[in-house]
């Protein structure tokens, strides 16, 4: 099975591996207005020639330290979207002062599988010590006071 045609289901939105479930596609599938309960105030960032509205899912919303898969499932459940790397970097630059006090993560939501069957997603992380870009297992648990970047609208 080719990498381009393998599907992985995140919550209720089918996502093509190497692709992304968009906010607009969730609306076409019958989703209603995004649920913003438990999110920070929204803010806009400029990405290329368009503006993107973002927010943070605050760590206190989760009853325990969430796994990467649980964060993605929550984003999908709320009819929000995981940010692309470009959106994450723009948001982190816009909110640099806040990141010094609040460790932040942007999970891109694109599930990839390597030849050994290892499933992972990319992420951008930021805190006082700096920013990191990498990939992580869906089972990874985010221990600490992380907050998670989401896209509300584009």
Image (cartoon, helix red, strand yellow):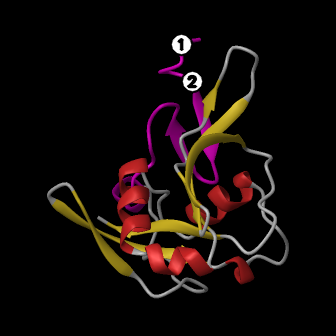
Front-lying residue, 80 or 50: 50
Separation of residues labelled 2 and 1 (CA atoms): 6 Å
Left or right: 33 in relation to 8 = left
Can you tell which quarter of the image residue 30 is in?
bottom left
Specify whether residue 36 is painted magenta: no
Mark 1 Cα-neighbour bin, 10 Å: few <14, some 14–19, many ≥20: few
Q: What span is colored magenta in the figure?
A: 1-27
Front-lying residue, 6 or 135: 135
Front-lying residue, 135 or 29: 135
Q: Residue drawn at (64%, 53%), measured in percent from left and top?
A: 11
Label number found at residue 147:
none
Specify the quadrant that holds the N terminus.
Answer: top right
Q: Where does the image place residue 13, in percent across and percent down from the top left?
A: 54, 50
Query: What residue did someone put label 2 on?
Result: 6
Q: Where does the image place residue 61, in percent across and percent down from the top left?
A: 71, 81
Q: Where does the image place residue 140, in percent across and percent down from the top left?
A: 79, 49
Q: Residue drawn at (52%, 49%), measured in percent from left and top?
A: 108
Q: Residue drawn at (39%, 53%), measured in percent from left and top?
A: 22
Secondary element under disc 1, as helix, strand or loop, is loop
Q: Where does the image place residue 7, in percent across and percent down from the top left?
A: 57, 30
Image vertical order of residue 40 relative to residue 118, above or below: below
Residue 144 visible in image? yes
Can you tell which quarter of the image residue 76 is in?
bottom right
Label number found at residue 2:
1
Residue 122 visible in image? no
Specify whether residue 12 is painted magenta: yes
Left or right: 29 in relation to 105 = left
Specify the quadrant that holds the C terminus.
Answer: bottom left
Image vertical order of residue 14 relative to residue 96, above or below: above
């Amino acid at each position: 099975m080719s990498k381009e045609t393998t599907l992985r289901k995140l919550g209720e939105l089918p996502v093509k591996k190497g692709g992304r479930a968009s906010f607009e596609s969730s609306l076409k599938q019958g989703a209603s207005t995004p649920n913003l309960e438990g999110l920070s105030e929204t803010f806009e960032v400029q990405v290329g020639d368009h503006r993107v509205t973002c927010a943070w899912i605050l760590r206190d919303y989760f009853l325990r330290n969430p796994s990467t898969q649980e964060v993605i499932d929550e984003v999908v459940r709320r009819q929000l979207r995981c940010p692309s790397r470009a959106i994450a970097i723009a948001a982190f630059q816009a909110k640099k002062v806040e990141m010094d006090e609040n460790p932040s993560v942007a999970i891109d939501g694109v599930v990839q599988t390597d030849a050994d069957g290892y499933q992972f997603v990319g992420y951008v992380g930021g805190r006082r010590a700096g920013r990191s870009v990498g990939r992580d297992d869906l089972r990874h648990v985010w221990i600490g006071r992380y907050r998670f970047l989401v896209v509300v609208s584009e």
